[in-house]
């Protein structure tokens, strides 16, 4: 998908409730080659999902080696509203 198509989907009303949450689950491949799925705080700034972590987090070396990730954001109501995002993580030190 192109960036404008992704933004269009994430701007839809059905995506707003999950994107308003503050915790998601980040899936990535660990340095040892095994899958990982960890809770992580995030925010949607209107064009990017922004996450933060500590500078010594074990996921950082793994993401440098393989930046492909999956993100699951869901609601606690039943039936849950679930947003699944796959893509390439980009790192920025602040």
Image (cartoon, grey):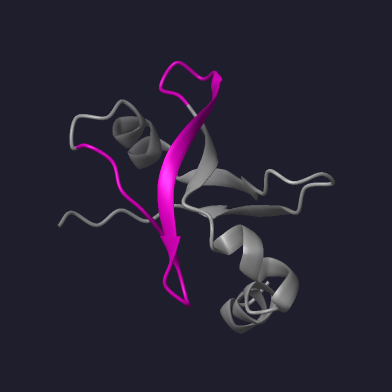
Closer to the camera in the image, 44 or 29 = 44
User: Is 30 located above or below residue 66 in the figure?
Assistant: above
Give the quarter of the figure containing the N terminus. Answer: bottom right
Where is residue 58, by image quadrant?
A: top left
Specify whether residue 72 is painted magenta: no
In this figure, what is the number of numbered marks?
Answer: 0
- Residue at 36 percent of width and 31 percent of height: 59
* Residue extending farthest right: 79
- Residue at 68 percent of width and 68 percent of height: 15
Where is residue 16, by image quadrant?
A: bottom right
- Residue at 54 percent of width and 63 percent of height: 20
Give the percent coordinates (x, y) of residue 4. 60, 84
- Residue at 63 percent of width and 58 percent of height: 18
Give the percent coordinates (x, y) of residue 66. 45, 39
Closer to the camera in the image, 39 or 89 = 39
* Residue extending farthest front: 77
Give the percent coordinates (x, y) of residue 35. 57, 23
User: Is 21 located above or below residue 34 in the figure?
Assistant: below
Give the quarter of the figure containing the C terminus. Answer: bottom left
Q: Which residues are magenta?
A: 30-54
């Amino acid at each position: 998908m192109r960036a404008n198509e992704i933004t269009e989907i994430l701007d839809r009303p059905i995506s707003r409730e999950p994107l308003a949450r503050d915790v998601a689950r980040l899936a990535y491949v660990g340095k040892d080659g095994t899958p990982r799925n960890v809770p992580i705080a995030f925010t949607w700034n209107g064009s990017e999902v922004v996450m933060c972590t500590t500078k010594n987090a074990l996921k950082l070396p793994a993401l440098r080696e393989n930046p492909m990730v999956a993100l699951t954001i869901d609601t606690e109501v039943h039936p849950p509203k679930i947003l699944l995002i796959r893509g390439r993580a980009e790192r920025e030190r602040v």
